[in-house]
Image: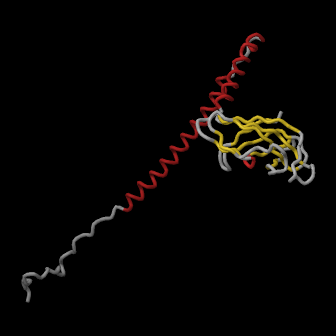
């Protein structure tokens, strides 16, 4: 009974003095450690990019300012700055111009308590844009913002799709009597906004 041989086909069972084979170590700790290290590295990378981006803007502004030595030099620099502003306006994907006009009541208007602005929207981009009076707001000189009231004025801005190079002109009317300062066109309900001062 002390030295019994196992029958063929039966597995050997460890005796009292034998140790079972060691379990394999799991690598979860290393994976978690590397994952945390990756997240910290990503945060540091984002912080560095943000610092470079904000630092670059400040540097450009200070480097472009030139002290004027004389009045003649200042006059020479002004046309260059005007040309740069004109070029940047030409390169804008959408331009908005506006002028205050008298409110011309339609049959749907209830009363005369409205303010109208004639708006021209021009598509300078390479893609089509959607124009809708609901995409235009009017801001008064007191800072109040007015959405477009539909159907209350004659010659209302049409809802159209503008191809590259096209423009549309129409009236946008806000509720109440106020002095219009600027209009804001938003490309779609969630797109980029473009402002045009009211002349």
Task: Report the residue at 53% width, 44% height from top.
Answer: 46
Query: Residue 94: percent from the left, percent from the top?
Result: 67, 36
Q: How is the image coloured?
A: secondary structure
What residue is drawn where x is 69% and y is 42%?
Answer: 193
Q: Residue furthest front?
A: 107
**How many badges with numbers are in the image?**
0
Name the side, left or right, on which 188 lies relative to 112: left
Residue shown at 76% from the left, 43% from the top: 157
Q: Is residue 36 above or below residue 142?
A: below
Q: Quadrant of residue 59?
A: top right
Residue placed most toward the observer, 94 or 17:
94
In front of the other: 193 or 62? 193
Check the picture and name the quadrant holding the N terminus. Answer: bottom left
20 sits left or right of 168 in the view: left
Q: Which quadrant of the view contains residue 4?
A: bottom left
User: 155 or 183: which is nearer to us?
Assistant: 155
From what the image shows, is residue 107 above or below residue 7?
A: above
Q: Residue furthest bottom?
A: 1
Quadrant in the picture for the C terminus: top right
Q: Is residue 100 left or right of residue 93?
A: right
Residue visible at 73% across and 36% down in the picture: 96
Q: Position of residue 17 (x, y in %)?
A: 18, 78
- Where is residue 31 drawn, in percent x and y? 39, 58
The location of residue 137, given as percent across then percent down, is: 77, 46
Residue nearest the observer in this picture, 117 or 45: 117
Q: Is residue 124 left or right of residue 110?
A: left
């Amino acid at each position: 009974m002390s030295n019994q041989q196992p029958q063929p086909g039966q597995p050997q069972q460890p005796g009292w003095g034998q140790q079972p084979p060691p379990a394999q170590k799991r690598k979860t700790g290393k994976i978690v450690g590397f994952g945390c290290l990756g997240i910290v590295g990503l945060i540091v990378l984002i912080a560095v990019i943000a610092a470079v981006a904000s630092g670059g803007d400040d540097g450009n502004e200070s480097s472009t300012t030139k002290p004027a030595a004389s009045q003649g030099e200042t006059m020479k620099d002004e046309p260059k700055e005007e040309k740069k502003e004109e070029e940047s306006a030409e390169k804008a994907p959408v331009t908005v111009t506006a002028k205050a006009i008298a409110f011309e009541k339609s049959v749907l208007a209830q009363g005369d308590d409205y303010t109208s602005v004639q708006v021209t929207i021009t598509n300078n981009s390479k893609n089509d844009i959607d124009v809708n009076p609901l995409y235009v707001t009017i801001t008064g000189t007191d800072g109040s913002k007015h959405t477009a009231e539909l159907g209350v004025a004659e010659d209302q801005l049409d809802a159209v799709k503008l191809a590259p190079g096209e423009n549309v002109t129409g009236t946008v009317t806000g509720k109440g009597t106020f002095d219009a300062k600027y209009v804001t066109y938003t490309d779609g309900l969630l797109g980029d906004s473009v402002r045009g001062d009211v002349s």
